């Protein structure tokens, strides 16, 4: 069984990043543990080093939804395209 550590650094309650992260988490097998960085009293960190060094996580998975803050961008279209990529991804 795989375990997933979701490091949540989303500030806004209606965060687009959080929306995309939830789609990824739906696809991953195993138990999910969430660490909300805004609830922790920690200084800025290099999250990849943290994941590998302290949690022994050898691999990270990233998805990209670019140009969301460009005036006139089709935000919903960009989010849906990214969500489609997440849903099509294969996880070990």
Image (tube, grey):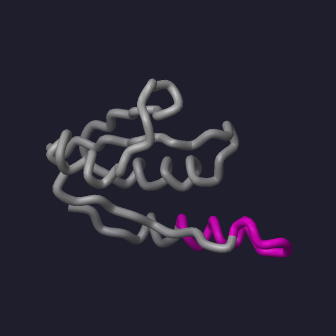
In the rendered image, the quadrant that contains the C terminus is bottom left
Is 78 inside the magenta-drawn segment? Answer: yes
Residue at the image position 33 percent from the left and 62 percent from the top: 61
Q: Nearer the viewer, residue 45 or 64?
A: 45
In the figure, is residue 30 to the left or right of 88?
left
Q: Nearer the viewer, residue 4 or 87?
A: 4
In the rendered image, the quadrant that contains the N terminus is top left
Could you say where residue 33 lies in the image, as x and y percent from the top left?
Answer: 33, 33
Q: Is residue 49 above or below residue 4?
A: below
In the figure, is residue 89 to the left or right of 9?
left
Range covered by the magenta-colored residues: 68-83
Q: Nearer the viewer, residue 19 or 70?
A: 70
Could you say where residue 10 lies in the image, as x and y percent from the top left?
Answer: 57, 43
Could you say where residue 63 lies in the image, as x and y percent from the top left?
Answer: 45, 66
Residue at the image position 58 percent from the left and 53 percent from the top: 17
Quadrant housing residue 60: bottom left
């Amino acid at each position: 069984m795989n375990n997933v550590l979701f490091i949540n650094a989303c500030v806004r309650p209606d965060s687009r990043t959080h929306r995309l992260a939830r789609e990824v988490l739906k696809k991953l097998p195993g138990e999910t543990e969430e660490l909300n960085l805004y609830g922790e009293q920690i200084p800025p960190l290099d999250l990849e080093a943290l994941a590998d060094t302290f949690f022994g996580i050898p691999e990270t998975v990233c998805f990209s939804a670019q140009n969301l803050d460009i005036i006139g961008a089709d935000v919903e279209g960009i989010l849906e395209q990214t969500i489609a990529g997440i849903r099509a991804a294969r996880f070990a």
